[in-house]
Amino acid sequence: MKASTRTVRCRAFLERLSLYIDDELSGPARRTVTLHLRGCPCCHELADSLRRTVVLCRQSGGRRLPAAVRARARARITALLAEGRPSPAKR
C-alpha cells in the first residue's frame, strides 16, 4: 500500500479511535477499525497506548486537569486532526 493511501486511512482511523476504545462504534465500523489495527503496526501501538492512558485516567479518579492544560490539549488535538485537510475555503 502506498504511503499516501496509508496516511489517509490512518487519519480516518484516528478520528474513530476514541469511540473504538470506549466501545461506542457500531458493528461494521468497529470491524473496520479492528481490521486496520491488525494491518497497521503504528496505529496498533497508538491504540494500545491510548487504552493504557484511558485506564490510568480512570484510575486517577475525578481529579480535573488545570484549565490551561486542558486548553493546550484541546488545541493540539484540533491541530492534529486538521493537518493535511484543506481549509473549508479551499474545498
Image (cartoon, rainbow, N blue to C red):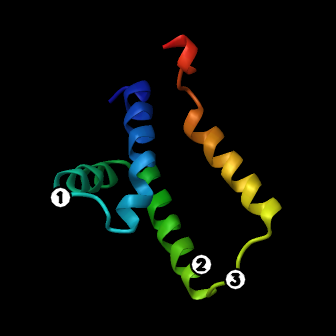
Does residue 24 sit above or below 2 in this rendering? below
Nearer to me, 13 or 35: 13
- Tell me if label 1 and label 3 are in contact, CB under 8 Å: no
Nearer to me, 61 or 8: 61
Horizontal side of 53 relative to 13 (left or right) equals right
The residue carrying pointer 3 sits among few (fewer than 14), some (14 to 19) or many (20 or more) residues within 10 Å by Cα, namely few
Dot 2 amino acid type = Cys
Residue 57, label in figure? 2
Q: Earlier in the sequence, mark 3 or mark 2?
A: 2
- Tell me if label 3 and label 2 are in contact, CB under 8 Å: no
| Residue drawn at the location 37% of the way across and 26% of the way down | 2
Q: Earlier in the sequence, mark 1 or mark 2?
A: 1
User: Residue 53: percent from the left, percent from the top?
Assistant: 56, 72
| Residue drawn at the location 79% of the way across and 64% of the way down | 67
At mark 1, the secondary structure is: helix
Nearer to me, 2 or 9: 9
Q: Which residue is mark 1?
A: 27
Residue 63, label in figure? 3
Dot 3 amino acid type = Arg
The picture quadrant where one finds residue 34 is: bottom left
The picture quadrant where one finds residue 81 is: top right
Dot 1 amino acid type = Gly
Does residue 6 sit above or below 71 in this rendering? above
Q: Nearer the viewer, mark 1 or mark 3?
A: 3
| Residue drawn at the location 57% of the way across and 20% of the way down | 87
